[in-house]
């Protein structure tokens, strides 16, 4: 789906230029087949296509990789070899960082596409085959996309935690058709614009189409925005109403919505991605399998004593011994396995024998058994699964302990699903079928929003805060006694910690919450060294944006 572009390429020959005087003034010419807001939508199908184009703007590599970089910044993942990643690793981001420039541009492309769609609908009172109900829904979905893009822009590039700050974002409520300078709105003005867009988005369908936003998604984003702008009574009210209406959508198992991204009612809005039409790239497979030090330390802290966390140790040598037995019977089996290993590494390795793999890890100082268990054995279960081979080796039991259950479910070697080493993103981008997606809004997060909004009001609201927290922590194996045992003056801190464990690697809120807590409460709730005075808590506006808009003011 190509995005709407108002670029006209007119090729005129030298002879044509010579005869211009016979045609009269060029200003009076009307060109055919020029797409404008007045004629880009001609019927119901073209209206739906333009809406699909707005949603598709979330899928470029520049957007999805930025979510990965933010996971690096929040300490949820350990590494990411993406352009600009070193600055995210230290959280010392400059105004020439390519990743921030690209996501800044893409988010404004979403806003411009949404504004263009609204303008196109408004320009045509009657559209063939399009009912007034569906027209209103499409218009509302455009406003939802605009509000979501504005939310990410404000939290990434604006002082979103300070309503008195003048450093909000540039707000566009109309399509941009050229180079136009405009100053930032204040933070308060930015929030007012986002809430106005969400108010206009309330006419979205109650039951949305696949990959589209419905009414519950709009309400969830409203609650999140209200929490960030510190309107705690209203955030609690909106979140509470959504919980009352949609509590049944909360899955009993933490991983259920990830295993069923398009079928779980808990997922309020995530991108519809299928191979090969709309993949989001391989960053989830490549980088998400190694947890960061922050998420690991927090998962350890929440259960038992510090540094007592242990994951299961699967019987890797049993798989290796099975592999050697197959090769002894049929030597060509080794070539089949090695080719699969090279393919799983996306061509970055070119091993020819198993001994090649072992020798590489011996060079790192490992023992031979360590080299086998780390370099060879992990490839065997995915290889046998791909080939439909039964090994006869029973899976080891999960005996992990000392970690938050959500961390165990996600990273334990016995429980892990898919090929990337973590069970939130289980699909392989190089196979047919569903692809990994961005989980932008989930029902589970609404409970954390409700809990914090109530807790920040204190007093009699603390009971409501504990009720919301207890409901969502049930499936993480924390009982009501645990929630009631949290001291009142630590309740907000503990809500933040558990919200981090719920959201890590998903929607960037694991990072935004750290910034909010540091600025509002003076608390680094998960001991992330990247959250400190002198760090780039808010990303600077890209230098390219400043060069194209002389009214923009950089952060001090």
Image (cartoon, grey):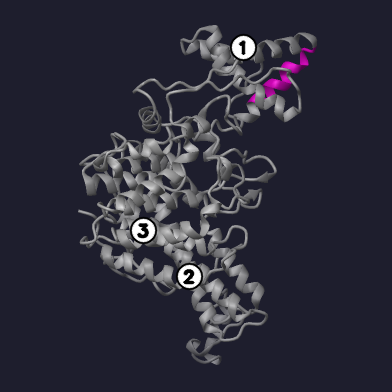
Res 376 visible: yes
The disc label shown at residue 317, or none:
1
The x and y percentages for residue 37 are: 52, 78
**Gap between marks 1 and 3 measured at Cα:** 52 Å
Q: Viewed as shown, does residue 384 lie left or right of 35?
A: right
| Element under disc 1 | helix
556 vs 379: above or below: below
Q: Viewed as shown, does residue 507 lie left or right of 374?
A: left
In depth, the one of 55 and 555 nearer the eye is: 55
| Dominant secondary structure (helix, strand or loop) of the stretch shown in magenta | helix
Which residue: 29% across, 37% down? 530
| Element under disc 3 | helix
Quadrant of the image occupied by residue 330: top right
Q: Earlier in the sequence, mark 1 or mark 3?
A: 3
Q: Earlier in the sequence, mark 2 or mark 3?
A: 2
337 vs 545: above or below: above
* Residue position for label 2: 202
Label 1 Cα neighbours within 10 Å, binned few <14 / some 14-19 / many ≥20 = some
Image mark count? 3
65 vs 422: above or below: below
329 vs 535: above or below: above
**Gap between marks 2 and 3 measured at Cα:** 18 Å
The x and y percentages for residue 391 are: 73, 19
In depth, the one of 307 and 94 nearer the eye is: 307
| Element under disc 2 | helix
Q: Earlier in the sequence, mark 1 or mark 2?
A: 2
Label 2 Cα neighbours within 10 Å, binned few <14 / some 14-19 / many ≥20 = many
* Residue position for label 3: 236
Res 149 visible: no
In depth, the one of 360 and 241 nearer the eye is: 241
Q: Which residues are magenta?
A: 330-341
């Amino acid at each position: 789906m190509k995005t709407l572009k108002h670029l006209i390429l007119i090729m005129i020959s030298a002879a044509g230029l010579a005869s211009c005087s016979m045609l009269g003034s060029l200003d009076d010419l009307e060109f055919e087949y020029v797409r404008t807001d007045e004629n880009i939508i001609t019927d119901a199908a073209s209206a739906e296509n333009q809406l699909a184009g707005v949603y598709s703007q979330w899928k470029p590599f520049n957007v999805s990789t930025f979510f990965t970089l933010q996971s690096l910044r929040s300490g949820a993942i350990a590494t990411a070899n993406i352009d600009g990643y070193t600055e995210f690793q230290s959280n010392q981001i400059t105004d020439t960082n390519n990743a921030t420039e690209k996501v800044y541009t893409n988010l404004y492309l979403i806003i411009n596409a949404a504004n263009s769609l609204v303008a196109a609908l408004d320009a045509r009172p009657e559209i063939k085959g399009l009912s007034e109900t569906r027209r209103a829904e499409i218009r509302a979905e455009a406003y939802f996309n605009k509000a979501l893009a504005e939310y990410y822009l404000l939290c990434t590039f604006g002082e979103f935690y300070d309503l008195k700050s003048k450093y909000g974002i540039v707000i566009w409520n109309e399509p941009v058709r050229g180079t136009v300078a405009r100053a930032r709105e204040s933070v308060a003005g930015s929030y007012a614009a986002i809430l106005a867009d969400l108010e206009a988005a309330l006419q979205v369908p109650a039951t949305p189409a696949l990959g589209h936003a419905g009414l519950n998604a709009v309400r969830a984003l409203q609650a999140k925005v209200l929490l960030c702008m510190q309107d705690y009574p209203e955030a609690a009210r909106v979140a509470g109403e959504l919980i009352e209406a949609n509590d049944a959508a909360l899955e009993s198992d933490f991983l259920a919505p990830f295993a069923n991204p398009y079928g779980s009612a808990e997922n309020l809005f995530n991108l519809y991605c299928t191979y090969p039409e709309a993949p989001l790239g391989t960053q989830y497979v490549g980088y998400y399998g190694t947890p960061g030090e922050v998420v690991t330390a927090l998962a350890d802290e929440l259960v038992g004593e510090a540094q007592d966390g242990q994951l299961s140790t699967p019987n890797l040598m049993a798989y290796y011994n099975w592999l050697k037995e197959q090769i002894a019977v049929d030597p060509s089996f080794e070539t089949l396995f090695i080719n699969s290993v090279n393919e799983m590494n996306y061509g970055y390795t070119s091993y020819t024998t198993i001994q090649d793999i072992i020798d590489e890890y011996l060079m790192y100082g490992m023992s031979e058994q360590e080299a086998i268990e780390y370099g060879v054995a992990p490839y065997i279960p995915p290889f046998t699964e791909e080939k439909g081979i039964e090994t006869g080796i029973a899976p080891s039991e999960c005996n992990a302990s000392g970690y938050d259950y959500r961390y165990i479910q996600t990273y334990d070697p016995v429980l892990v699903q898919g090929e990337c080493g973590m069970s939130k993103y289980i699909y392989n981008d190089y196979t047919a079928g569903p692809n990994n997606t961005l989980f932008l809004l989930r029902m589970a997060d609404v409970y954390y929003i409700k809990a914090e909004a109530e807790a920040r009001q204190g007093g009699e609201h603390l009971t409501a805060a504990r009720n919301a927290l207890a409901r969502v922590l049930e499936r993480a194996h924390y009982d009501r006694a645990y929630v009631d045992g949290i001291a009142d003056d630590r309740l907000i801190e503990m809500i933040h910690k558990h919200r981090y464990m719920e959201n890590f690697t998903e929607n960037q809120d694991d990072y935004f919450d750290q910034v909010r807590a540091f600025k509002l409460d003076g608390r680094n709730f998960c001991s992330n060294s990247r959250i400190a005075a002198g760090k780039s808590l808010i990303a600077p506006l890209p230098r390219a944006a400043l060069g194209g808009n002389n009214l923009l003011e950089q952060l001090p």
